Image (cartoon, rainbow, N blue to C red):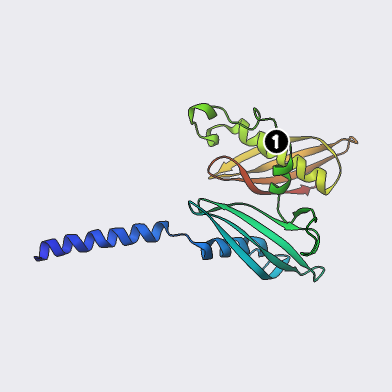
Amino acid sequence: MNYTKSKKAAAILLAMLATTSAYAYNKDNAKHACINKVTEHGSGKYHGTSGLHVTDKGHHSYAVTGNVRSHRDKSTHHFSCNIRHKELVNYQVSQGKSSNKNAAAAIGVGILALAVAAAIDNHNDKHKGHDTGASPFDDMHYLKRQCKQNIKNQISHDRRPVKKIKIDEAHLNNRKLKGTGYVVFKNGHERDLTYSCNFDRRGNIYDGYYHFRRR
């Protein structure tokens, strides 16, 4: 093989290796992504993972389960993560101890867990141009509607029943929608808030938060 052919072969090999490296994703990646999310990279309310199990669902999609210790009550809680196409799309931590299989899962998960459980009309769950393959991020009305629904579900669970959520400001940065608004409770009281909703590439919310603020 002459020098020119050798250079071409080397270039092809390097390109193949680079492509493989760029798209490589395995069980270890899924496990670490889940642990980092649940423990917030060691700075959150949970630590000391154990009993980890990773299920490969194919197409770079994984289900990760295990147990984690709580800084608050020193007890062990069960957690799970769902990873689709290399992206962690949801996770949950049980309220009860890991031995309680019927424990409700909803603490420390931002908005998502309640959003999944909420009954949302299929029509309202689709963005403008959904049937023609348009991007959900071109439809601000859809993004705000989804975010409001999720915030409403979360506050209703954490506080008291909510009548409606109103958004005053909404700013989309990459796939994160954040801004300000207020909540109207069913008893007539109101609270101002800030919010953030993180969407995956398909326009589904996988995490988010809200904070009350002073008027």
- Type of the residue with mark 1: Asp
Badge 1: few (under 14), some or many (20 or more) residues near its Cα, within 10 Å?
A: few
Q: Quadrant of the N terminus?
A: bottom left
Q: Is residue 89 left or right of residue 135?
A: right
Number of numbered discs visible in the structure rendering: 1
- Residue ID at (85%, 40%): 161
Whole-percent x, y for residue 196 in the image: 66, 46
Q: Is residue 173 left or right of residue 113?
A: left
User: Mark 1 = which residue?
Assistant: 168
Whole-percent x, y for residue 160 in the image: 86, 43
Residue 195 image-quadrant placement = top right
- Depth check, front residue: 142 or 69: 69
120 shown above or below 1: above
Q: Secondary structure at mark 1?
A: strand
- Depth check, front residue: 17 or 180: 17
- Residue ID at (40%, 58%): 22
Outermost left residue: 2
Residue 143 image-quadrant placement = top right
- Residue ID at (66%, 29%): 124
14 shown above or below 210: below
Please indicate, yes or no, whether residue 36 appears anywhere in the rendered image: no
Whole-percent x, y for residue 185 in the image: 85, 37
- Residue ID at (67%, 70%): 49
